[in-house]
Image (spheres, rainbow, N blue to C red):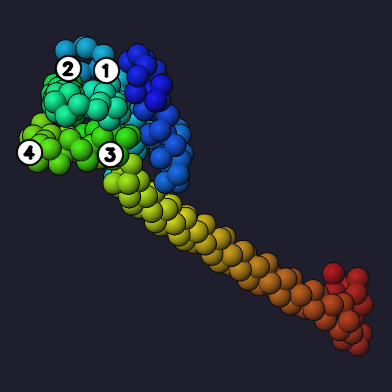
Amino acid sequence: ALALKGDKKMQGNWGELQLEMILEKAGLQDGIHYRKEVSLKDDEGSRFRPDFIINLTDSKHLVIDSKVSLIAYEQYFNADIEDDKNTYLKAHIQALFNHINQLGNKNYQKLHGINSPDYIILFVPIEPALYLALNKDAGLYEKALNTNIVLVSTGTLLATLRTISYIWKQENQKRNVIEIAKESGALYDKFVGFLNDMEGIGKKLTDAQSDYEEAMKKLSTSPKKGTTIIGRI
């Protein structure tokens, strides 16, 4: 209730908290799979701070922005007079539409430092608020898509993030297999080198043994009769 009625700073902090809880629930880790409030520049040098940047396995990124300016929705929810409810509902839809336009104008796809896909995810943390707006204005979702924005709620975002988490797990397993193969190859090369060295040592030992036996034979062979060792020397 305080998040809905509070100032924009409180609303923004609450929305980001909800979003980060979903990221963690999906199995994604801060600093590894996602970054939050990273300051980035566009071609003109203007700075932007997307709420969250999700790292994808193909060196791309997914930008998620949280929308919690839902004061009109809270007024609609608590209004008793039908005319007032209709007025607040229109204001709620217009607030979402305005945020879609504002987010679309930021051109997050052109920011330096990220390789963003064509679409930006706009997260509405209060699921009934999003469904109410979509039911009243069926074209709102299409309007967002035309601005390269995808509207999501808690359920749809969690499913998307769990898919990303699964892909990361598969990628990590693949990397582990490759690393094991590399280490196994290096170990095999060392083993082959060790065997070659041992064969060389064995050959040298055999040659030394042969030389030793020849030398001993010479010492043990008796000189011919009538010949002294000194005379032979």
The type of residue carrying mark 4 is Gly
Q: How far apart are marks 2 and 4 (CA)?
A: 32 Å
Q: Do the residues labelled 4 and 3 touch (CB within 8 Å)?
A: no
* Residue named by callout 1: 48
Q: Crowdedness of circle 2 by 10 Å Cα count: few (<14), some, many (20+)?
A: few
Judged from the image, the secondary structure of the residue bearing numbered disc 3 is helix
| Mark 3 residue crowding within 10 angstroms, few (<14) / some (14–19) / many (20+) | few
Q: Quadrant of residue 92?
A: top left
Question: What residue is at 91 percent from the left and 88 percent from the top?
Answer: 225
Identified by mark 2, the residue type is Asp
- In the depicted view, which residue is nearer to us: 225 or 110? 110
- Within-10-Å neighbours for mark 1: few <14, some 14–19, many 20+: some
Q: Earlier in the sequence, mark 1 or mark 3?
A: 1
| Marking on residue 139 | 4
**How far is disc 3 from disc 2 in space, using C-alphas?**
38 Å
Front label number (1 vs 3): 3
User: Which residue has dot 2 on it?
Assistant: 43
Among the two numbered marks 4 and 3 on one chain, the one whose residue lies closer to the N terminus: 3
Nearer to the camera, 121 or 72: 72
Tag 1 near tag 3, CB within 8 Å: no
142 sits left or right of 99 in the view: left
Q: Where is residue 42 in the image (x, y as percent from the top left)?
A: 20, 18
- Dot 2 or dot 4, earlier in sequence: 2
**Labelled pair 2, 4 in contact (Cβ < 8 Å):** no
- Residue extending farthest to the front is 81
Question: In the rendering, at what x and y percent does residue 99 appear?
Answer: 19, 23
